[in-house]
Amino acid sequence: MNLPDIQPPQVDWASGAFADGPLLSKSTRLRDLAGIFADEPARQQLPGEQVIYDVEMLATSPAEGELYTGVTHLYPGRVGGEYFMTRGHFHARREQGEVYFGLRGNGLLLLQNEQGEARLEKVFTGSVHIIPGFTAHRLINTGGEVLSALAVWPGVAGHDYAALANGFALRVMVSSEGWEVHHD
Amino acid sequence: MNLPDIQPPQVDWASGAFADGPLLSKSTRLRDLAGIFADEPARQQLPGEQVIYDVEMLATSPAEGELYTGVTHLYPGRVGGEYFMTRGHFHARREQGEVYFGLRGNGLLLLQNEQGEARLEKVFTGSVHIIPGFTAHRLINTGGEVLSALAVWPGVAGHDYAALANGFALRVMVSSEGWEVHHD
């Protein structure tokens, strides 16, 4: 028994930070999100290098049946009257689901099926989101701090962004109540 | 937008307790664990109705690609010189993996492949365990409090207990150091 081998990776529940794992990281910046927000001129006036969200995931096997684990950190902010959000995607393997857990911050998870029907779930510390297969998903940060969510998804799921080329059926906009829904 | 619909289930990171979800619960008692511990006479002398572990899971779809979410609460205690543990299992669909997250308490995750090679990972608050496919898994509580672990696994995985009829290749026993490994 090789004792050093028994230390697994860790996640800090308060921040979503990983430690001791083989990590992959990706930053998505404003310049990567052309056409995603309703107010494209407003997006172009903001600095393109600004990071909107960071994803860190454990570099584990992508084989059939294996699960990936990662954390999305979505920063607070707005483009015009719209809250910062992730690009959102269907899985390439449409039947593959995902589970999200809210770790910190406050936001919304936007879910949309292949018939274009959208719904929202509140994301907060301890929230659990069972994302079924055949369902596109996007995080939206409606709060003033970082929104961090832990995700587990099948290694074979893949991403399909093209299927959402026309966007989701609803948008979450700033309002005097905090946020409100606009239907496209 | 039906606002009450947007409240998802929640998990309390400190205790692993679920709220607001459709839950399934199962208790496993000493009388359900005949032949699992090394000292079977010691097991028979303890009260059979004693709960060794509770599992709570969200009642969600078992379809191909969908993920289950649940928490195991493994209580502290010993049978003879052996720490309380779960029965342990392979998945019926052998290629299907699982992810565990330590929430509270201290213990070990025993992993064993189909060649009978076993290894241990420490389980503690924030520990992340990527259980590959083709790998049996068992939780062991080496601490003095409840060991609670959050798990995400594929709805199609299923359980195969029979493949481990001869048990795992190693046992975790009480020792003056806290615990030590015995090879069967």
Image (cartoon, coloured by chain):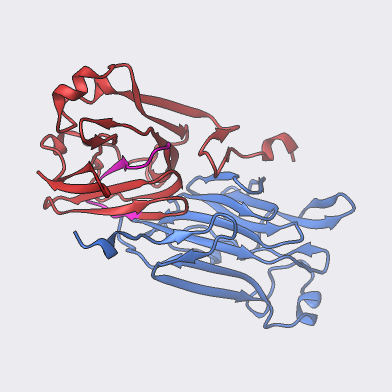
Chain colours: A blue, B red
Q: Measured along the vertical axis of the image, is residue A57 above or below residue B147?
A: below
Image: magenta residue range: B130-146
Q: Is residue A44 visible?
A: yes
Q: Quadrant of the C terminus of chain A?
A: bottom right
Q: Is residue A65 visible?
A: no
Q: Measured along the vertical axis of the image, is residue B126 above or below residue A24?
A: above
Residue B183 lies, in percent from the top left, at 11, 47
| Between A124 and A13, the one nearer to me in the picture | A13
Identify the residue at image location x=68%, y=36%: B5
Taking the view exactly as shown, the residue that stands out farthest to the right is A176
Q: Measured along the vertical axis of the image, is residue B139 above or below residue B125?
A: above
B131 drawn magenta: yes
Q: Left or right: where does residue A63 sit relative to residue B164?
A: right
Identify the residue at image location x=34%, y=53%: B122
Identify the residue at image location x=76%, y=76%: A43
Residue A138 lies, in percent from the top left, at 61, 57
Taking the view exactly as shown, the residue that stands out farthest to the front is B176
